[in-house]
Image (tube, rainbow, N blue to C red):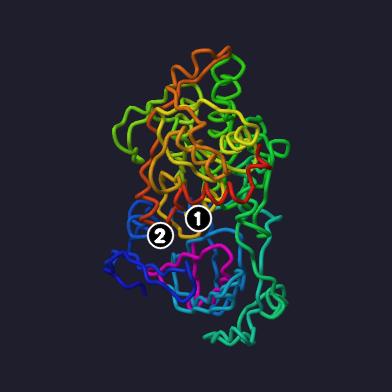
Amino acid sequence: MAEFGKALGSTETPIPGLTMWDLPVHGDSRGWFKENWHRRKMGDAGLPDFGPVQNNVSFNDAVGTTRGIHAEPWDKFVSVATGRIFGAWVDLREGPTFGAVFTTELDPSRAIFVPRGVGNAYQTLEPDTAYVYLVNDHWSPNASYTFLNLADETAAIAWPIPLDSAEVSEKDLAHPRLADVTPMGPRKTLVLGANGQLGRALRSEFGGDRHVEYATRADLDVSAGDLATARPWRDYGVIINAAAYTAVDLAETADGRREAWAANTTGVAALARIATENGITLVHVSSDYVFDGSSDRPYVEDDPVSPLGVYGQTKAAADAVVQSVSRHYVVRTSWVIGEGKNFVGTMAGLAERGVNPKVVDDQRGRLTFTAELARGIRHLLDADAPYGTYNLTGSGAAMTWAEIAQKVFGLTGHDADRVTGIGTDEYFASATGPVSPRPRMSVLDIAKIESTGFSPEDAATALERYVEGASWRKAE
């Protein structure tokens, strides 16, 4: 008999992510009514927006009908339509809670959210029992399940009706014991642009994690028309988009404009669609170029964008698209330095060769080293930080490009006065090719990401280590 009058609410269990739900049931002598699923109300109450795509019903005419223990590669929300069941859940995911057990009874006024990889089993306690479950992937015979024997001695589930008196299929009786179960791994992470400066830093950050895959443009081109079928996307939980068209000056040409929009916006829109349809967290790296540089203070995440050039326009458009994805991180950064050709390596090389450069002194910002950018991205994911846009640069005082060049000269044992500051307009006055306008103010406020527990390294300290470690010799 369903309990009437409960308030909607959840209760945590010993298994992470497995939550019990009380459902309001309204009834009288004629019967009862309940809202079995209400996306907004349950989301407001804390249920993950798991995006159900299929609704299934299991009808059982006899008491003692027992099914399980099955761990599916999708999330499910299980509730009772009529009757009463005993439920048992065993964590079959990789991790410290592997083998954890939770049991309880469910009736029409109680439901449970079962995350991917948690084994579930149900035994009917009344005749003509039906339970309903919403799942966030379409059933497929090719899906990879993990199973546990109903009589496993380690789980030691106290079935109300002993298994030798219950209705159980031969298949369920043949499942392995816990010691022989291969735990279900997490959904995979895909890093795009894996051969770029940031891509290489992400390879280093995630190391040998076997659940992380890397794709170069040759492996997967985000601007290609077959992106939707390029991977079995339900196997992935995170996409980190480190691929981009970054030739800011060439983007001002006809060919460059087309390439920039294809890679930076059209391709990202395709990724956003895939992420939305498959419940994937999309991490997208953005730029200070989405701003015009006219601010008299560091830019915060919700400042209006106003890009000056084509590159900035494509990045701003991509930001807007990614922000429509439920699970997203837009990571805005500036003045990126990593493995490969970059400003620091160029200045160090000039210093070594005796060249006295003229360097722009009216643009201000902070350097961001790719190792720090990769570390911050991993932090957002590992910390389950609230989805949204985050500025991520080095910390400390802002500098001009000329001041950075002078520091590089000094750190390499050369006279910093050999660097002459010059205005942006004067610097580009003699340019023979296209020039993209640059924001003069590129300092990004990093308080938001600091509030999540991440402390970006001081940019000047990172610069000193980079130069003294001779990394610039590889980058030059």
Q: What is the secondary structure assignment of the residue under circle 1?
A: helix
Q: Measuring from the top left, give residue 359's x and y in whole percent.
A: 49, 27
Q: Measuring from the top left, give residue 216's x and y in whole percent.
A: 69, 40
What residue sits right under mark 2 in the picture?
A: 453
Q: Measuring from the top left, give residue 255's x and y in whole percent.
A: 62, 16
Q: Amino acid at mark 2?
A: Gly
- Which residue: 68% across, 57% down? 143
Residue 155 sits above or below residue 418 on the image: below
Relative placement, left or right, of 9 versus 71 is left
Q: Residues within 10 Å of mark 1 (few under 14, many from 20)?
A: some
The circle on residue 219 is none
Residue 435 among magenta residues: no
Q: Closer to us: mark 1 or mark 2?
A: 2
Please state which of residues 57 and 382 is positioned toward the viewer in this rendering.
Answer: 382
Residue 120 among magenta residues: yes
Q: What is the secondary structure assignment of the residue under circle 2?
A: loop
Q: Measuring from the top left, give residue 423's x and y in whole percent.
A: 42, 22
Q: Amino acid at mark 1?
A: Leu
- Which residue: 60% across, 20% down? 256
Q: Are marks 1 and 2 in contact (CB under 8 Å)?
A: no
- Give the quarter of the figure containing the C terminus: top right
Stretch in magenta: 107-134
Q: How many marks?
A: 2
What residue sits right under mark 1 in the picture?
A: 381
- Which residue: 65% across, 51% down? 203
In 3D space, how far apart are the residues under numbered discs 1 and 2 (Cα atoms)?
12 Å
Relative placement, left or right, of 475 versus 257 is right
